[in-house]
Amino acid sequence: MSDLIHHIAIQDDWEMSRGFGEYVVSTRGVHLDDAGFIHATTADRLGAVVAARFGDLTLPLLDIAIRPEGLAAEGIAVEWVDGDAHILGALPMTNGVVASETPIAR
């Protein structure tokens, strides 16, 4: 099994996407269509990303743990750039792809 990759989601964005069955937010305030990918990172870089990109935000955040092999099974590639993962497509909100959804305590 591959190591999980992690996407930081604003909880409201994640919850509103459930009805569509896929998540299309690249990062805070940026749609997948505008960025071309969904930002993700490794578990050890999660805290630094939260501090850098979401430190001033008071909205609840979620750590979305993602199975790279689940993405591959759905035909969605992952590209690594400077230690971070770029998910090259919409994120299916299925058990095969999403390993867990954990609130981020700040």
Image (cartoon, grey):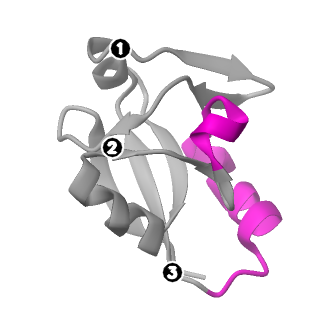
User: Looking at the picture, how far across and down is residue 63, in whole percent?
Assistant: 47, 59
Viewer can see residue 39: no
Q: Is 37 located above or below residue 72 in the figure?
A: below
Q: CA distance from mark 2 to mark 1?
A: 15 Å
User: In which quarter of the view is residue 16 placed?
Assistant: bottom left
Q: Amino acid at mark 1?
A: Ala
Magenta stretch in the rendered image = 31-58
Q: CA distance from mark 3 to mark 1?
A: 29 Å
Q: Amino acid at mark 2?
A: Glu
Left or right of residue 84, residue 70 in this image: left
Residue highlighted by disc 3: 60
Q: Crowdedness of circle 2 by 10 Å Cα count: few (<14), some, many (20+)?
A: some
Kindly give the residue lying farthest to the bottom in the view shown: 58
Q: What secondary structure is marked by label 2? A: strand
Q: What secondary structure is marked by label 1? A: helix
Q: CA distance from mark 3 to mark 2?
A: 20 Å
User: Looking at the picture, how far across and down is residue 67, in whole percent?
Assistant: 35, 31
Q: Crowdedness of circle 3 by 10 Å Cα count: few (<14), some, many (20+)?
A: few
Nearest-to-viewer mark from 3 and 2? 2
Residue highlighted by disc 1: 72
Residue highlighted by disc 2: 22
User: Looking at the picture, how far across and down is residue 42, in whole percent?
Assistant: 59, 39
Q: What secondary structure is marked by label 3? A: loop
Residue 76 located within the stretch drawn in magenta: no
Q: Which mark is residue 26?
A: none
